[in-house]
Amino acid sequence: MLAYTIKRILQSIVVLLVVGLVAFSMFQYVGDPVDNMLGQERTQADIERVRAQLGLDQPFPVQYWKFISNAAQGDFGISYRQKRPVMDILRSSAPATLELAFVSGLFALIIGITLGVITAIRQNGFGSGIIMTLSLIGVSLPTFLIGILLAHLFAVELGILPSKGRGETVIIGGWVWSVFGTQIQFPSWRTGFLTESGLRALILPSITLGLYQMTLIMRLVRSEMLEVLRQDYIRFARARGLRERAVNFRHALKNTMVPVITIAGLQLGSIIAFAIITETVFAWPGIGNQFILAIRAVDIPMMAAYLMLVSVMFVIINLIVDLLYFAIDPRLRVDRTAGGH
Amino acid sequence: MFRTLLAATTALTLIGSAQAETFRWASTTDPQTMDPHAVNSAPVLGFLNNVYEGLVRRDRDMVIEPALAVEWRSFPVESQSAEHGWRFVLRQGVTFHDGSAFTAEDVLFSYERASSEDADTASWFGSVTDVEIKDDYTIDFITNGPNPIFPDSIANWMIMDSDWAAANGTERPSRDTENFATINTNGTGAFRVTERSPGIETVLEPFDNWWGEPEHNITRAVFSPIPNSATAVAALLSGEVEMINPIPVQDAERAAARDGVKVIQGIEARVIMLGFPHDHEALKFGDNAGDPNPFADLRVRQAVAHAVNVPAILQIVMRGTAEPASQLVSPAMRGYSEANAARPEFNPDRAKELLAEAGYPDGFSFGLKCPNDRYLNDASVCQAIVGMLARVGITAELNAMPVRNYWPELRADNFDMYLLGWSPGTFDAEHPIRFLAATPNTEKKLGSWNFGGYSNARVDELLPMIQTELDEAKRQQMLDETATILNDDVAYVPMYVQPLLWGVTENVTLTQRPDNFFILRWVTVN
């Protein structure tokens, strides 16, 4: 187990290094950050001085190596655009993204499972047909269009929900705790969960972001349910005279949950990573929005840190999944000794 | 049911606006910093004009008026032998937001800070050789020669408290790291920043001890950046913000048709023009790449000027929001040349004749470079130009790209023709001559945006004379002469002045200034 884990971690590190390398080789073509940092009245000398200051005059392997060696020490540099440490920016905008991802994940799971069960039980019902057809829209319409449509309907036409931003937010955490003389500071967290306007602001972006995952889960639950409902033990349960609800939810649904949870876990990573579009449409001040702004300004440290962050996240999720498989599947454990076939 | 809901929400918004004059507005970009000397860009300077003040400021019509200085005059008055410069008499009884008094010491400090190597505003002080404090409320700027537009060029130079800067370790602006002044402010302006979350929102409140007479009725103003224009329009229409800048050209009509929203339209200082590769030996793109550069021939440049149908561009692409331009500055700028107010007429037949005379009866093919996210509808304008040039037989291969790739391409000389917009920072006709028409010279800091390498000995000769001429009439004469030379040479093809389009809710009155600065103290919410 230990050897396997170490092997996987080493592989993950290689993946991260490659991601960084690809990112840095691409930054050469994203544009020149210098124009964004200097005003209209800059001279050629200013341009060269700033390029030298930023180390942009060096070949990209050198820039990449600098970035990697600093990143290994937790230093992601200073944002060109905002002149603040990139880590500070990510830390202060992460809560917005994580809260959005959490709520849309929850939305996708609850609504997705409910609708999945309904459409499976009433397989040929009229309502199921409508839900299934509508779910096609969720899969096929691009996120930004859904977001703009929702904002137009609920914010502009009906005026009942906000179309942008997080509403009022409250900062929690940041307390300093003294344990045996050492100061421990809790990270501070700007939350939108505690105010009414903060919760209202979450509704449209969460639906937009979670819609795709919701339809995915719904279709998965439906097909798994249909599969399970045909099994013998369900018939026996019915034959024993158990109530329909107990059969559907206690016996059938439970058995469909294994693949659903796997998929939902893997999708959490993409919810966070693909929040970029939703955040842009709703001017949501999260890390995805920061990434878009960073691209426009050719803010290389910010782009690099974001890409690394996202790949770390995916690598960790995959690592956990791999390790879970290892725990579940005994064949992986005997792999080494049983060789030869 | 929708109607009841709508009525209910309207009632709610009405109650909301009745209780407090909180004003919320949005723009595409967040000011990168709160430091008035660190970045010389419109979003930063425009925002900070509400918080910090300069010695002079611009009024609603862009005319210089007293701010922290009550009067100023150039010297020497009589003798030509003495030093040249400007004396400013400062306003008394002004306090910074933190309560400390404003004196000449702060002006000297702010000069040193804004002209330092770390500042992005040093070019405003290029002619200043020394600054002398005469007494607490009198200060002299010594210049290396007569400088008639010095007060104009420092209208956005903002004064910072020297003690506050020293106490917080921010004596110099910082380019690469944040410092205290990046987030915090302490100006003398009508508004003070009470809360700053970069990229999320910035809250301002009126400064009670401001020296001026407030004309606004705002008790609290909240700015939030909305990078996506569709989101901004939705926020305006739903009443979540009272003002957005800009409102996209294609949404303006639709938005204006709605109840409760109006579009305020004006002319920006920015002139959009076509540039030529004057000093290139050969064409670089298209089927004729490698052939001698046809644009070196005046007749070909004239042909382009006659081939581009500016009225059609304005009507169709800009939807009637922009004004035609005949020279490098708009009529709102100081030093605009009335004598050169006529554009070359749209005349494709004349263009064909000129091309034939120049030896291109069958036209030629070349590469047109264009940004696609820098100016309003820039890529569409270029597409229209491609079609218009095709009508006279020259084939432009359009390559439109984001602005972050665009400037490096132009600097590397990778173009046969390009689109450029220029907004004179000093609001004076001398500015584009210095940057776009003077022969490029790194040492003298001239022609730094003259990508095509246009060069005319008489223009180079006139520029320093314009820069030092104190007599308005003589100066205008020289500006007229320069404008005529540039038009005769077709150094550029100025096409139109870009419009300013702000979306505002009906209950707000405000003033739109051609520099696209949004001044809070001119806002009233009814």
Image (cartoon, grey):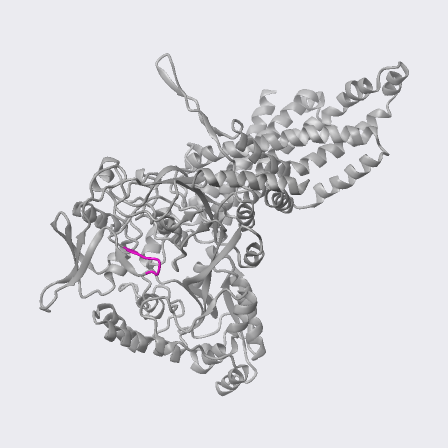
B61 inside magenta stretch: yes
Query: What percent of the width, then of the height, locates residue B60?
Result: 35, 58
Q: Tally the numbered discs.
A: 0
Query: What percent of the width, then of the height, locates residue B215?
Result: 34, 49
Relative to A1, is B490 above or below?
A: below
Residue A73 figure quarter: top left
Which residue is at a point 31% across and 41% down the rendered structure image? B207
- Which residue lies most toward the right here? A239
B480 inside magenta stretch: no
Which residue is at a point 65% across and 43% down the rendered structure image? B3
- Which residue lies most toward the top here? A180
Quarter occupied by the C terminus of chain A? top right
- Residue span colored magenta: B57-62
Residue B186 figure quarter: top left
Query: What percent of the width, then of the height, locates residue B12?
Result: 55, 38
Relative to A148, is B72 above or below?
A: below
Which residue is at a point 89% across and 13% down the rendered structure image? A240
Is residue B408 among what the camera can see?
A: yes
Q: Is the magenta stretch mostly helix, strand or loop?
A: loop
Is residue A285 among what the camera can see?
A: no
On the rendered structure, is A198 left or right of B75? right
Relative to B307, is A93 above or below?
A: above
Query: What percent of the width, then of the height, locates residue A325?
Result: 67, 24
The foreground one among B196 and B137 is B137
The foreground one among B68 and B76 is B68
The foreground one among A1 and A99 is A99
